[in-house]
Amino acid sequence: MCFRPADASADASSSKCPECGQDIQVLSGIALKRCPHCRCDLVPYLKGEKPVPAAPAAPKPPASPSAPKAPNVPKA
Ligand SMILES: [Zn+2]
């Protein structure tokens, strides 16, 4: 009498929330659809539709706007 999970290939006993990085305890056979910590939607991650961000992406600094050229001061 050995118990075998229906799908052994999808073994995710524990994982981390891709959004907040907190540990998420996944019960066998029960996939959490929302992070209990940040309440984010985990379904896209579970389905593989959304790539898991490796690290919180730092917002790109806006390209330094070219400083407006000083208006030509008419010679007085
Ligand atoms: Zn989270």
Image (cartoon, rainbow, N blue to C red):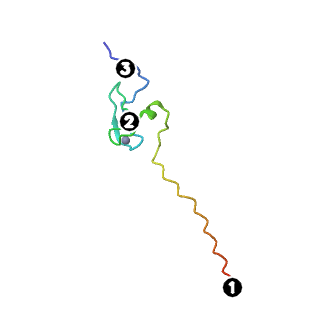
- Viewer-nearest of discs 1 and 3: 1
Residue 72 percent across, percent down from the top left: 67, 77
> Which residue occupies 49% across, 38% down?
51
Describe the element under mark 1 as helix, strand or loop: loop
Above or below residue 75? Residue 64 is: above
Describe the element under mark 2 as helix, strand or loop: strand
Residue 67 percent across, percent down from the top left: 60, 68
Q: Which residue is mark 1?
A: 75
> Which residue occupies 38% across, 32% down?
33
Describe the element under mark 3 as helix, strand or loop: loop
Instruction: Choose the circle earlier in sequence order: 1 or 3.
Output: 3
Q: Quadrant of ligand 1?
A: top left
Name of the residue lying farthest toward the top: 1
- Viewer-nearest of discs 1 and 2: 1
Name the amino acid, label 1: Lys
Q: Which residue is mark 2?
A: 15
Find residue 36 and report its image quarter: top left
Q: Which residue is mark 3?
A: 5
Question: Between marks 1 and 2, how big is the CA–CA gap?
Answer: 70 Å
Above or below residue 4? Residue 75 is: below
Name of the residue lying farthest toward the bottom: 76
> Which residue occupies 38% across, 43% down?
21
Instruction: Choose the circle earlier in sequence order: 1 or 2.
Output: 2
In-front residue for pair 31/11: 31
